[in-house]
Image (cartoon, rainbow, N blue to C red):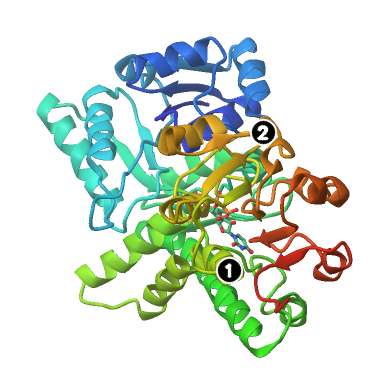
């Protein structure tokens, strides 16, 4: 098979590379010449564990190609994925101009039957717009070429994307013809060896599945954050409550970890977009509105604890921060809770010294010189009045607390991810504040 993947962002690059990995001939296309030049040199636009090696292996095997020329790359393809960005507008709705521009240029250039697949997260109804765009472009050329449109949402987690792609829980594909179903079945066959299914459905349902999945996951998190806050007030321990409810298979143990709010490019965007789609269609997503509200408030919880501990005058205090990215194993700073916490600390006159294993260069784009970037996690602690654990990178889980205590000016830890044991912290002489446990 031969496929094209348009858009070499996170989704496009992982998708293209993983298809090449199973032997498919893939061309990844982008309009950004610099990105394509860099990819030819093996320089990736994103950080994702294992991806760099996989790209170079498949380029060397001549299965993975990069190009800016969509007209050429699309020739002879069985499938073309559209994986370009859908940036959220002011009102939270997804901007489809890039998706539709790609659809148009596919319509202007295909010469054989092809399944055009939306892979970007797009609102219900987008595949129909893509179909129209391609049909119009073909009509302009007076070309009588058959095509199908399909919707194939991705469920990749940053930091685990390759594994998620190669061993998916499920693959969801929205189709409107048997021919498209046959092509998509053939394409995904190598990924179904672990017994998980490919689920075919109508196109609007596939589009909705993506939003429903992310919204359900965001709901679990906001629900647990709400419970955690109440646990603190009532003197219950949210870790115990989490274990207690998670053992019920209907609830499950995953995604019920309280923290400082969900971030990243997906949950905040998708929750907002679904609320917006619903309201445009005369329906109110009451649960999701609350999910969003709880999340906004939760991003401020760690800062409130700092204020409660030190009192209102934070001026001149130095705060050490471990972790800047919205979650471990990524350099993604989009909607990261660290940004809200740092903004609040700086506004109160604190100085901030931060360390993150990979996200510091990315963080500099938004934070600039407003904070100090430490050379390692211990360097961040020197003479700080407190440590705030903001992202649960593995290397933060088991530091020498002797060293931590010696470097800090005051033995105070605010743990936004509950990675330490409150009893051990107390024993080691720390004032320890975490989420959902009264300490
Ligand atoms: C999420 C989904 O998990 C993927 O299935 C989906 O494909 C992706 O969005 C997408 O739409 O592209 P991702 O944003 O990479 O993936 O990150 P997650 O690992 O899901 O974490 C999201 C946020 O939830 C993080 O801020 C994390 O700290 C937080 N979280 C997660 C919690 O606070 N508690 C939990 O129990 C789990």
**Considering the numbered disc 1 on the image, is that residue within a helix, a strand or a loop?**
helix
Q: Is residue 362 above or below residue 43?
A: below
Give the number of callouts. Answer: 2
The crowding category of the residue bearing disc 2, from other C-alpha atoms within 10 Å (few below 14, some 14 to 19, many at least 20), is some
Name which quarter of the figure residue 118 lies in: top left
What is the distance, in whole Å, between disc 2 and disc 1 at their CAs? 34 Å
- Can you tell me whether the CB of the residue at mark 1 lies under 8 Å from the nearest atom of ligand 1? no
Does residue 149 appear to the left or right of 242 in the view shown?
A: left
Q: Nearer the viewer, residue 16 or 316?
A: 316
- Give how far across and how far down residue 335 sits, in percent: 44, 51
Q: Is residue 385 above or below residue 34?
A: below
- Give how far across and how far down residue 8 sits, in percent: 44, 28
Q: Nearer the viewer, residue 56 or 229?
A: 229
Q: Which mark is residue 69?
A: none
- Give how far across and how far down residue 375 sits, in percent: 67, 29
Which quadrant of the rendered structure holds the C terminus?
bottom right
Residue 86 in view of the camera: yes
The residue identified by callout 2 is 49
Which residue shows up at 70% across the image and 46% down it? Answer: 393
Which residue shows up at 22% across the image and 48% down it? Answer: 129
Disc nearer the start of the sequence (2/1): 2
Name which quarter of the figure residue 137 lies in: top left
**Considering the numbered disc 2 on the image, is that residue within a helix, a strand or a loop?**
loop
Which residue shows up at 22% across the image and 39% down it? Answer: 97
Q: Which mark is residue 305?
A: 1
- Give how far across and how far down residue 360 sits, in percent: 56, 33
Does residue 188 appear to the left or right of 127 in the view shown?
A: right
Q: Is residue 384 above or below residue 63?
A: below
- Can you tell me whether the CB of the residue at mark 2 lies under 8 Å from the nearest atom of ligand 1? no
The crowding category of the residue bearing disc 1, from other C-alpha atoms within 10 Å (few below 14, some 14 to 19, many at least 20), is some
């Amino acid at each position: 098979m031969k496929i094209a993947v348009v858009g070499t962002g996170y989704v496009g690059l992982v998708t293209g590379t993983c298809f090449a990995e199973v032997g498919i001939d893939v061309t990844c296309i982008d309009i950004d010449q610099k990105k394509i030049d860099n990819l030819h040199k093996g320089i990736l636009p994103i950080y994702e564990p294992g991806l760099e090696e996989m790209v170079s292996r498949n380029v060397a095997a001549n299965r993975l190609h990069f190009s800016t020329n969509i007209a050429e790359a699309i020739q002879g393809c069985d499938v073309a994925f559209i994986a370009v960005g859908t940036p959220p507008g002011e009102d939270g709705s997804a901007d489809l101009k890039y998706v539709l521009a790609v659809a148009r240029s596919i319509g202007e250039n295909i010469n054989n039957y092809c399944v055009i697949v939306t892979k970007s997260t797009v609102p219900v109804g987008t595949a129909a717009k893509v179909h129209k765009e391609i049909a119009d472009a073909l009509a302009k050329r007076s070309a009588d070429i058959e095509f199908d449109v399909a919707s194939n949402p991705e469920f990749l987690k940053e930091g685990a994307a390759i594994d998620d792609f190669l061993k998916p829980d499920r693959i969801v594909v929205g189709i409107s013809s048997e021919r498209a179903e046959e092509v998509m079945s053939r394409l995904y066959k190598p990924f179904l060896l672990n017994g998980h299914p490919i689920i075919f459905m109508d196109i609007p349902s596939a589009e909705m599945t993506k939003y429903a999945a992310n919204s359900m996951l965001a709901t679990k998190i906001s629900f647990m954050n709400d419970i955690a806050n109440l646990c603190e007030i009532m003197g219950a321990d949210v870790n115990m409550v989490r274990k207690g409810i998670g053992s019920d298979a209907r609830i499950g143990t995953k995604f019920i970890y309280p923290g400082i709010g969900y971030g990243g490019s997906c949950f905040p965007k998708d929750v907002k977009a679904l609320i917006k789609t619903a309201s445009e269609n005369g329906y109110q997503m009451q649960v999701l509105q609350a999910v969003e509200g709880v999340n906004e408030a939760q991003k401020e919880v760690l800062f409130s604890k700092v204020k409660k501990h030190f009192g209102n005058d934070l001026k001149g205090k130095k705060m050490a921060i471990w972790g800047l990215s919205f979650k471990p194993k990524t350099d993604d700073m989009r909607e990261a809770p660290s940004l809200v916490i740092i903004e609040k600390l700086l506004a109160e006159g604190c100085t901030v010294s931060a360390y993150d294993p990979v996200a510091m260069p990315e963080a500099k784009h938004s934070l600039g010189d407003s904070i100090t970037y430490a050379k390692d996690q211990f360097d961040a602690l020197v003479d700080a009045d407190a440590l705030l654990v903001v992202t649960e990178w593995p290397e933060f889980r088991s530091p020498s607390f002797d060293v931590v205590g010696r470097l800090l000016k005051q033995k105070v830890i605010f743990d936004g991810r509950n990675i330490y044991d409150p009893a051990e912290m107390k024993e080691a002489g720390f004032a320890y504040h975490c989420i959902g446990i009264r300490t």
